[in-house]
Image (tube, rainbow, N blue to C red):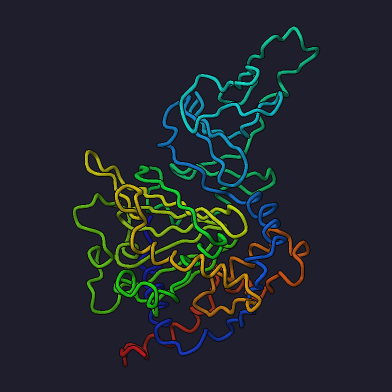
Amino acid sequence: MPMSPAEIQQLRDLMEYEAARTAPPEGFPALPDIPAGRYVDPRYYQLELDHVWRKSWLLAGHIDEIPEPGCFRLWENAGQPVVLVHAEGGAINAFYNTCSHRGAPVVTEESGKKKRLTCQYHGWSYSHEGELMAIRDPEDFRDLDFSCRGLKEVRCERFGNLIFVNFDEEAPTLLDWLGPIAAEWEEFQFDKCRLAARHVWDLDCNWKIAMEANTEVYHVRSIHPKTVSPILDDRRNVNTLYLNGHGRMVAPVPAGDRGNLDAVGVPDDVVQIDTVGEIARTCTQSYGLFPNLVAPLSAAAIPPILFWPNGIDKCRMETWTMAPDWGDGVAPDLWTDNNGESLCQVLLEDTQFGEKIQKSMESYGFKGVPLSYQEVRIYHWNQAADQCIGIENVPEELRVQQVIGDEWIYPNDPRLAFVSAEVPARQASPERP
């Protein structure tokens, strides 16, 4: 369901509080520098591979990519060979793409449809549930127990039409991982939006450099003066922090622009998600889902961007567009031009400095990153990353200090205590600072 009137008003009041403040909120901690090594040190990169990518829920696919029983799709974005399978009973399963005989892949095509998953090396075949069904020359094996020779399962859960995987058997459920975000996302009908576009781009920088450009608005007036800045009031941006490293930003259209779909760049003739409420229709509303997903949500589309490591100084940026059924019209794609021929202008602006930043961070002169209050979601992410890794496992010189306490994590928000006293004063003198 959309936000309630009380929740909307609370957000509007917080926007005005943010516009009026002349310093970070009272009680907000000073943010120590992010150590430089978190972007360039092989030790921290390995810790990310061993813990962050292994223990987190990762978006791997959309039901449109494996729409019928028997359909499969390979997925290796997190460095592990995984095959997603639509089983006969309707379930979506994930397995390591590794035959239990000699380790060969059970499928080699990127996608397709098969009654069984059969290893081409020696012909061992498996059901869509991962069970070993048949082997070649069974008489040559003694006491081979089929029941324990199936494909190794990868945890797989869905949120609407999205398919997530997790390599950690002890991890919480996907819904517990999402926390209150799951309820906030209900208005966007993830169970009805189709996959319209999915493209991958190689970038020459650490994956966090690329992702962080999409998790703060401090850069908007410098990098996006003609694209984003005219439709996003960065001084009224409201950041919200959630458990597990997730975050959200909500920023209205600048004063003087019409606060409607036209103002945020959505044409009136686009098929819309009719359950979406006022905030997503009149503001830029974007979520960061730990560890690597950024999702601006609107009445017209669900267009997540994902960032995957491809080496310590290289990454892959994946752009998705999901939308209500567009019928016989052209499938929408918010992030690329000419169906993946090139990135759109906004993402070209966001990615233009990645390689240069990487080189600068590798220099002798780079010691760390001082973050502003506006960049709090980056620091919050780093705290969560060290918690995921295990703070004791992170070399002391690479750790971030755990300075953002639970009092700043949703539903807690000390700013709300200041709003009730300051809103009446602003109403009497509405000029912006």
State the image coordinates of residue 226 (x, y, percent, origin top left). 29, 72
Residues 349 and 57: in front is 349
**Quarter of image, res 400:** bottom right
**Quarter of image, res 401:** bottom right
Residues 423 and 71: in front is 71
- Pick the quarter of the image with the N terminus: bottom left
Q: Is residue 165 left or right of residue 183?
A: right
**Residue placed furthest toward the left:** 269
Residues 146 and 369: in front is 369
Q: Please determine whether, in this image, residue 361 is positioned above or below residue 330.
A: below
Total numbered circles: 0
State the image coordinates of residue 22 (x, y, percent, origin top left). 46, 90
Q: Please determine whether, in this image, residue 366 is positioned above or below residue 185.
A: below
Q: Is residue 140 left or right of residue 266?
A: right
Report the residue at 63% width, 51% height from top: 53
Report the residue at 76% width, 9% height from top: 140
- Pick the quarter of the image with the C terminus: bottom left
Report the residue at 58% width, 20% height from top: 118
Q: Please determine whether, in this image, residue 122 is positioned above or below residue 379.
A: above
**Residue placed furthest toward the top:** 139
Q: Is residue 90 left or right of residue 280?
A: right
State the image coordinates of residue 372 (x, y, percent, origin top left). 53, 80
State the image coordinates of residue 421 (x, y, percent, origin top left). 44, 87
Report the residue at 36% width, 64% height from top: 346
